[in-house]
Amino acid sequence: MGDLDNLNFPTMIGRYQVLRLLGSGAMGSVVLAEDPRIKRKVAIKLMKLDAVRTEADQHEYLARFQREAEVSGLLNHPGIVAIYDVGEVEGHGPFLAMEFVPGKPLDGLMKAGSALTAKEKLRILAGLAEALDHAHAKGIIHRDVKPGNVMVGEDGRAKLMDFGIAKREDASLTQTGIFLGTPSYASPEQIREGTVDSRSDIFSFGVLAFEVMSGQSPFPGTSINTILYRIVNEPPIEVQPPVLGILPEGWRRVFSKVLAKRPEARHATCTAFVRDLLDAVLDLGKEDRREILGLMRSSGGSPLPEIVSTSFDETMMVPRPEPRKAGLAWIAALALAVAAGGGWLLFRGPKGTRLQIDSLPTGAKVFVNDLAVGTTPMNQPLAPGDKLRLDLMGHQPIRYEVKPGEAPPPFPLQPIFSEELLDSAPQGATVVLDEKPLEGVTPLKISWNQGQAHRLTLTKGNLGHASDFGPGEVPGSRVFELKEATTAETRQEPPLDPNAPGTLHLAGGFSVRVKVDGEDMGELSPGGELALKPGSHKLELTSARHFYKDTRAVTVIAGQATALTVPGLATLTVETFPGTGKVLVDGRDTGIESDGSSIQVARGRHTITVRGPKGTRTETVDLGGNKGLRFPL
């Protein structure tokens, strides 16, 4: 207690007994204390009001302090540091009593060059993604996502902290034209306008993930102005050498999207970004992938080294156009508060059993008793009588009531089909949907699957129009204006190099692994492109996840894109009686039982086998759409 005596700290803060000082900064201190009623260790953050020079600034910092308590009270997630209590100590100002999290700051681990494996890094990102999506579902925007605000526990799990400058979507603490946060992790719109929504957090999370995976910043610079300029105007740097285990093309595709300058061009959620990143990783096993997606408990590991975070020195308030420091050094104490000690605090959630919630396809928003809790796949404490609702853009919602002794099954989400009228000006245009010509010309009525993305092309003579639609988007009553195509002559471009590479553009409902002339080119996602030299090539397309395999020949033309189409997906449900068995598709284990469980399979002909203790049954089916099989075993 000697250090506390020298700093004139009280021995009691509220009902909490002060044990020792954890850290101190210009704006406040953090101490370790104990709640004598329940013998729980807590970290208490104290704010120094006398360190704030003006009354206006004092009001601002008090508002942020109160906001952190209010925001944290709305959040209940194992990946977010919990706030237990808020109060005021006479002569010492306001205080927050928060979860004491043993662990090490992520930025410190990165700076120390800790040898985290790719799996450990992806587990950290998966946990943070789920925590951020939980906050966004509650209408909370963090606004300062960075490694210094992340703690890594001794079991490798991540905790997001410091919601001091977070805001609710219906409220604001700062004036327009000012952004709060750390320049290196700010989004373009945060820099330009000072206004943010959840997509700004997604951008900041993308910067964090770029650094965690590569050890490099996507927008490096020796000055704040240089960094801000690159974030607003330049693409992320090329990583040299490439990240081990991820093809450069897959890396560029994933991070070009999450770090897009336009918010609407980014991934819809943080977990969608992590799933996309996982698809680009080559050397991750099926079980490891399932563990990361399900945020299963860590298998353990050696304790993390003792490291102190220093990133808080970079936290700034930057008005346009010139940056200035806001003096938030006291936030550093929060990093120290959770950086000491050992062990991991268990999940504090609603009473009930923690169960897996999954859907086909994944990415559905999950509501428990009409409260948003995250997206599939996820683990969630559930009790009998809880009412689940799963919503996914372009799909019919599913409702389910938890029954005693039952775990919710994987929910097959059915796409919404609507009748759409495709019209153009002028009319009479031919229609190509997802690289397939349709019979008839505009105006043309068609059946539209809202559950998948679409590419629509309309042409009439030298006039044309092309549009991309995401899941849930429909043409509606739009009349597409046909315009004259721009040619190389009208653009006055130089003649095309006959040796210039062409591209393959993947159109379809799922990612495939591509081999070109026997060379493995890695995963290609829908909408992705693969550069190839001109000429004829033999392609081998496979998707282990969706039981797809095809071999074909293509001719690539210099400087032109060639469509590479794969079939859509169908939901296959298998049920046998009186017993069940293991389900195989085309001789490969699906991981499901024939108890009415479902799996998504590429459309086409497949051999379905069920192996049970009472025998084996094999059937060949043509999947042109969703299909249910039920037969005796």
Image: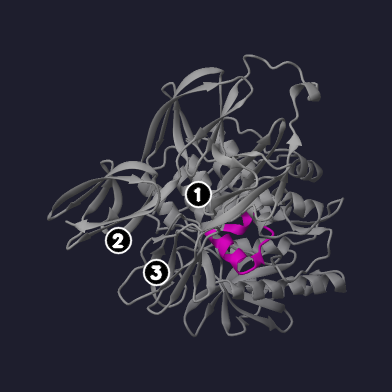
Let me know if residue 497 is in the magenta part.
Answer: no
Quadrant for residue 441, please give it. Answer: top right
Identify the element where label 1 is drawn: helix
Horizontal and vertical percent position of residue 613: 13, 55
Question: Disc 1 marks which amino acid?
Answer: Arg
Compared to residue 331, the image places residue 291 above or below, namely above
Identify the colour scheme used. Answer: one colour
Quote the CA–CA distance across marks 3 and 1.
22 Å
Question: Left or right: where does residue 183 sit relative to residue 301?
Answer: right
Q: Is residue 262 visible?
A: no
Which quadrant of the structure image shows residue 628?
A: bottom left
Identify which amino acid the numbered label 2 is placed on: Gly
Q: Kindly identify the amino acid type of the residue bearing the numbered disc 3.
A: Arg
Q: Which residue is mark 1?
A: 275
Of label 3 and label 2, which has the lower sequence position? 3
Q: Please tell me whether mark 3 sits on a helix, a strand or a loop.
A: strand
Instruction: Give the image location of residue 523, x and y in percent.
Output: 48, 36
The nearer-to-camera label among 3 and 1 is 1
Residue drawn at (57%, 81%) of the image: 16
Residue 278 vs 98, above or below: the answer is above
Around disc 2, counting alpha carbons within 10 Å, would you say few (fewer than 14), some (14 to 19), or many (20 or more)? some
Range drawn in magenta: 130-150
